[in-house]
Image (cartoon, grey):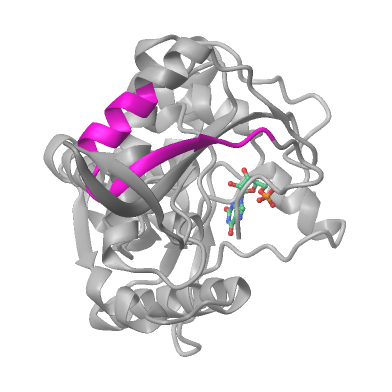
Amino acid sequence: MDMNKRPENMERITTPELAQAFIDEQVAAIKEQVKDGKVLLALSGGVDSSVVAALLIKALGTNVVCVHVNHGFLRKGEPEQVIEVFKNQMNANLVYVDAAERFLGKVAGVTDPEQKRHIIGEEFIKVFDEEAAKLKDIHFLGQGTIYPDILESEQGIKAHHNVGGLPKEMDMELVEPVKLLYKDEVRVVGKQLGLPDNMVYRQPFPGPGLAVRCPGAITRDRLEAVRESDAILREEFAKNGLAGKVWQYFTVVPDFKSTGIRNGARTFEYPVIIRAINTTDAITATVEDVPFSLLCHITDRITKEVAGVNRVLFDLTPKPSATIEYE
Ligand code: XMP
């Protein structure tokens, strides 16, 4: 039997009952596979790795070592939430690595988008490997592989890049409890495991995070402006019923300044661009028709609350011609 093939008769997990049956079955399977061994897991805080972490912890308790690498490009409140949910509430064995300064140093002055992504990806693997090398007697690696990853890598669309490039000498067996599930099923399982809604229903977020929303060379002031404006946008979308409706929404702070006025004095500051799109497959996308009054309210908040910003723009461009992200 091909273990990477979803059985024809496997029922789609759509209800709490089906999710619970899946959880019970996987907890037993994990215990059977790992026994009293230890599992290492890279926990990003995204839906897939969070659900795998919760399943592993349920089965193995502190024999799961979760490593959360904060590269400094996460959204406001995200690293804190990972610590709160996993360490404080689930009592997980969590290694939290604050590598923000290290990453900022690596990308300082780097303007080319692909080079930036490459540097962040490489550094991420390096930091994770360094942490893994400090741990002893771990023979299993947990991974948040889901079924579309398997299908896409079989079809040659993209390499299955979940494996965090582990040190060669670490010969680890994979534990992939959600590898036959589709994304919507992972969410139903996450909800049943008691994970918070903003983790379970999180919008897609690129691996390099806010770094690709600071086009060009990243600076601390623009990174901070993108993080704060993104938090305001998310708060307002949630308050106004758009959070569950719009597929993806975020802010971007481009690398130019323009003239403005505040309290009768000239300012020369950055703009914030708002992007809100809908799609089913991320291959094409349309722009959400955000109510004008809400856009005006968000503009008012951002220009008042975010340091170094004097202007707010709304991106009207579908994909194509624009991609969803700016880099
Ligand atoms: P683009 O910008 O190519 O984005 O239209 C399509 C979707 O993919 C997300 N995205 C990424 N997701 N790692 C990810 O996991 C990445 O490096 C990455 N880059 C883009 C993007 O947010 C959008 O949903």
The answer to whether residue 266 is left or right of residue 154 is left
Q: Nearer the viewer, residue 152 or 92?
A: 152
Q: Position of residue 203 (x, y in %)?
A: 51, 34
Q: Position of residue 88 (x, y in %)?
A: 12, 40
Q: At x 34% / y 12%, what residue is drawn?
A: 239
The answer to whether residue 151 is left or right of residue 185 is right
Q: At x 43% / y 37%, what residue is drawn?
A: 312
- Image quarter where the C terminus lies is bottom right
Q: Position of residue 137 (x, y in %)?
A: 29, 76
Is 311 in the magenta?
yes
Residue 18: quadrant of the picture: top right
Is 259 in the magenta?
no
| Above or below for 274 versus 33 | above
The answer to whether residue 301 is left or right of residue 230 is left
The answer to whether residue 247 is left or right of residue 237 is right
Which stretch appears magenta? 298-316
Residue 297: quadrant of the picture: top left
Please, which residue is most extreme toward the left here? Answer: 88
Q: Nearer the viewer, residue 160 or 197?
A: 197
Q: Position of residue 80 (x, y in %)?
A: 19, 45
